């Protein structure tokens, strides 16, 4: 299964994605997957691990991450408490051509 398919399935099942991106191990809940400018990307809510953007504060509206699918490595999926933030209803700009978006 490709990384794209793994993340897409995680959206469908409201599962947690654990992956490394830019050298940081991240625990994230995927919300949207598709393409922007022909590149496959996903919008994640990161709740654990580390980030080059600074500390991960639980529940923070600043934990949104737009990540190119091809840049994720060591990707796995697990069951657990699926997370989002109060500002999820704000229009996202990560993906122009939405393939799948989580139903809230």
Image (cartoon, helix red, strand yellow):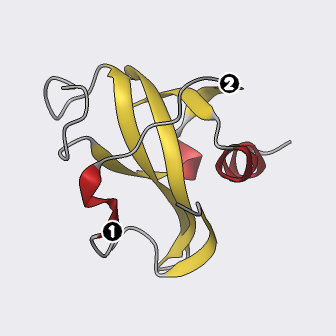
Q: Which is more toward the observer, 16 or 75?
A: 16
Q: Label 1 near label 2: C-beta < 8 Å?
A: no
Name the outermost residue toward the right: 1
**Percent from the top left, x then y, of residue 60?**
19, 38
Residue name at image x 65 percent, y 51 percent: 11
Q: Is residue 22 visible?
A: no
Between discs 2 and 1, the one toward the N terminus: 2
Q: Quadrant of residue 79?
A: top right
Left or right: 46 as drawn, with respect to 54 = right
Q: Which residue is under mark 2?
A: 79
Q: Which is more toward the observer, 75 or 60?
A: 60
The relative height of residue 46 versus residue 11 in the rendered view (above or below) is: above
The relative height of residue 12 versus residue 14 in the rendered view (above or below) is: below
**Percent from the top left, x then y, of residue 17?**
58, 32
Residue name at image x 46 percent, y 72 percent: 95
Q: Secondary structure at mark 2?
A: loop
Left or right: 57 as drawn, with respect to 40 = left
Q: Quadrant of residue 99?
A: bottom right
Q: Which residue is under mark 1?
A: 89
Q: Secondary structure at mark 1?
A: helix
The relative height of residue 11 versus residue 6 in the rendered view (above or below) is: below
């Amino acid at each position: 299964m490709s990384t794209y398919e793994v993340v897409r399935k995680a959206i469908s099942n409201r599962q947690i994605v654990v992956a490394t991106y830019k050298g940081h191990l991240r625990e994230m809940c995927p919300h949207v997957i598709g393409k922007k400018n022909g590149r496959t990307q996903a919008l994640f809510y990161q709740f654990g691990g580390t980030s080059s953007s600074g500390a991960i504060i639980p529940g923070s509206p600043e934990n949104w991450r737009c990540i190119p699918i091809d840049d994720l490595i060591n990707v796995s999926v697990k069951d657990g408490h699926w997370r989002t933030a109060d500002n999820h209803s704000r229009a996202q700009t990560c993906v122009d051509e939405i393939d799948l978006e989580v139903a809230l």
